[in-house]
Amino acid sequence: MKRAVPLLLVTLLAAPAHAHDAFIAPPESCGEGKPRRVIQGTFTDDIEGSYVLVPFRVARRATKVRVRLCYDQPESPTSSRVRHTIDLGLYEPRAGRDRRFGRDEFRGWGGSSRPDVFVSPKGATLGFLPGRVPGGKWAAELGVAAVAGQEEGDSGGDVAWRLEIFTSNKASHRKPRWKPTPYDATPAIDEAGWYKGDFHVHAEHSGPNDATMRETFDYAFSNEGAGLDFITLSDYVTSRHWGEIGRYQPDYPNKLIIRSAEVITYRGHINNHASARFVDYRTGPIYMLRKGKKLDRIRKAKPARRIFRQIHDAGGFTQVNHPTIFDSSVPTFGNICRGCSWEYSDEETKWSLVDAFEIATGPGGTSSPEGNELGPNPFTPLAIEWWDDLRSRGFRITAVGSSDSHHAGGGNNTTQSPIGEATTVVYAPELSERGIKAAIEAGHAYVKMFSPDGPDLRFEATAEGLGQPAIMGDRITASTAAFTATVLGGAPDPQVRTLLVMRNGEEYRSVPVPSDEFTYEFSADGPGDYRLQLQRGTAIEAVSNPITLAPPATSSLRRL
């Protein structure tokens, strides 16, 4: 169920794109150097959201492959944000007779931020996999992310592109050969407890201007930075960073770096947590460019549920990222944050396969010039409303919050913030990939929107016949239950905080929080999801996952 876009964001409206048959000449060159081969063409917006494989041959003796992409832009864009966008990926020769280039042939994905990439045994562009360079038919993948139409300021309504291929057979590209460092899966802390983390963090393998892995870990784990217990390193699409985490782990004792990847599709983004398996990100149609002219569709569009199943099959857990940010149904929003909002239908998604739902992404809220929070990030209430609706339909999806950080402690903007804004606090049996997965699957978590140091929440329920108190995420079978809500560190400074008890997404109780250690007790006899929401003025400061009160004989307590 999608929600309306906030009125304050609709000021970015622009006209929709239209297809056109005009041909625009590709750029004459993508830069210095003479390529071994040039392939060029034009895409119209009727294949927007698709992937085009452009094959080229590499000699057996080659030790390095380099691919460079350039393309034109609208002559008179209606907005500075209106642009053509083509993403670049790379695949090595296929091992069998399968016409498609797939998971086994994947060598990297740079999006539109890395248009000049290489691979060799010695090294590769960040985000790409070093390794041997087999001879045969390779493929550059052109992801047709956005094609501006005539009404957006492009005279032809299409994008002309040029692909340049370079190869080398120098022996110096072979050694020293890059080798991945083994990941240590031993628990960072081997005991149960509440652990603070960020479920969506990027570093150098996502973009050329992103923080290094060292900068990211230093800020995430130091007391001078975010002071977290764990992060998920969710670089774009690739698995390259998983082979490099191991070299940093010994420097951060009692801290956890979860292997993750943000699976970028043109209709939504997914976090692939702890599977340690690359999954195919391409849900749009895949075409093969034949003889440099004809597009031959070799695979039709696939649903998002296929990605969720692949992650689960590999033992990982799934997350829908920033589902309400810059809804692409609003013209030009797709140019601001390409594919960021969740545009798949319920059938294409299959919500029962989703473990976590990002209710908060980036900045916690809006601020006045004096620095006092005036209200929530406008996308956050929409995401919470959507999550509440999914819960009401029986999907036991856990709410999480993340920074979507690309710059460690900097880079604060509409869609990303310093690591830890937002923070998710989980109750896990141990601090490990397995332990965090168990916590998310159980729903033992709450979200702090503004800071890792913000107020903490505790939420318990007891009922007749219940052996131990239920905590957030649990489901209890009873006609009535006694609830205890606690807010730690919530004294009024400078604004009085208010604790809301929500039932099935609607306000059920409301009380002020007058002290740093405030406890509120209440009883309830109606079935439903009961959760906490801490308000600071109109800003949402923290949200808990619910305790579900279910009528007898319909469910049972679910604990770690």
Image (spheres, grey):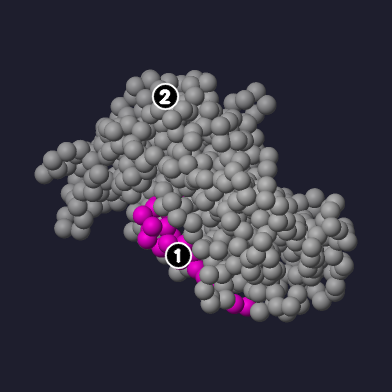
**Residue at 51%, 41% in the rendered image:** 244
Q: Position of residue 417 (x, y in %)?
A: 59, 36
Query: Is residue 328 visible in this depiction of the protein?
Result: no
Residue at the far left in the pictured view: 465
Magenta stretch: give its range: 297-319
Few, some or many residues within 10 Å of mark 2 (<14, 14–19, 20+):
many
Check residue 305 in the rendering and tell me which mark sits there, or answer none. Answer: 1
Closest to the observer: 60 or 407? 60
Frontmost of labels 1 and 2 is 1
Q: Dot 1, crowdedness within 10 Å: few (<14), some or many (≥20)?
A: many
Instruction: Answer with left or right where residue 439 lies relative to residue 256.
Output: left
Q: CA distance from mark 1 to mark 2?
A: 40 Å
Element under disc 2: loop
Examine the rendered structure and indicate whether residue 518 appears above or below residue 447: above
Q: Which mark is residue 490?
A: 2
As rendered, which of 539 and 27 lies closer to the eye?
27
State left or right for residue 305 relative to residue 202. left
Is residue 132 shown to the viewer in this render? yes
**Residue 518 versus residue 172 in the image, above or below:** above
Q: Quadrant of the C terminus?
A: top left
Identify which residue is drawn at 56% across, 45% down.
178
Does the stretch in magenta take in 348?
A: no
